[in-house]
Amino acid sequence: MNETLKVLETRRSCRNFDKERMVSEEDIQAVVKAGTYAATGMGRQSPIIIAVTNKELRDRLSAENAKIMGTATDPFYGAPVILIVLADKDIPTYQYDGSLVMGNLMNAAESLGLGSIWIHRAKEEFESDFGKKILADLGIEGNYEGIGHCAIGYAAAPANAPAPRKENYVYYVK
C-alpha cells in the first residue's frame, strides 16, 4: 500500500499525549506547511493557522476551552502543540476550507509519527473577548471564525486499531 493511503487508513485521534516530549520545530513547520496546502474554494485560502507552542498560552486556551465545555479537565489531552485554524467568514466556503486544513494537519502529523486530535469549541473561544484579545495581540484583523484546534504531540500509548467500516458506507453507480 502506498504511504499516503496507509496514513489515511491508520490515523486515529490521540487522547493521551506524552506531556514531557516537545515536538521539534522542524516537524511543527512541516505539519503547518501541509495545512497551508489544503484545497480551498476557488483557491481563496480563507483559513489561517495560529501555531501555539507557548505553554502559558496553551494552558490558557485549555482552561477557556474546558470552561466552554463545562469541565475542569484538559480538553487537549496534554498535547504540547495546539494549531488553531480560523477562517474568513466573508468567504462562502470558509467552513469547508478550514475543515480541509484540519484534515491536512492531522494527516501530516500522522505521517511524521505524531499523534493528533481535532478539538472543537474554537468558534466559541474566538467569538469571546478571550479569543478576540488573542487575535488583537497577534495583530490579526478580519472576520474570522474558529474552526478547530489540532492538538499534536507524541502519543503516550499506541493508537487503537481502526473500527470496521460500517455497511453501506459507499454506494457505487456504474
Image: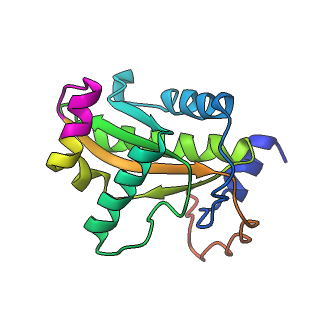
Total count of labels: 0
Q: Is residue 168 above or below residue 103?
A: below
Q: Is residue 83 above or below residue 164?
A: above
Q: Which of these two is toward me, 73 or 56?
A: 56
Q: Which of these two is toward me, 90 or 42?
A: 90
Q: Residue at x 23, y 44 (%)?
A: 131
Q: Residue at x 36, y 43 (%)?
A: 96
- State the quadrant of the C terminus: bottom right
Q: Is residue 23 visible?
A: yes
Q: Residue furthest front?
A: 56
* Bounds of the magenta segment: 133-143
Magenta stretch encompasses residue 140: yes
Q: Is residue 93 visible?
A: no
Magenta stretch encompasses residue 26: no
Quadrant of the rendered image containing residue 17: bottom right
Q: x and y percent of residue 172 in the render?
A: 58, 59
Left or right placement of residue 55 versus residue 47 in this view: right
Q: Is residue 81 above or below residue 47?
A: below
Q: Residue at x 20, y 38 (%)?
A: 133
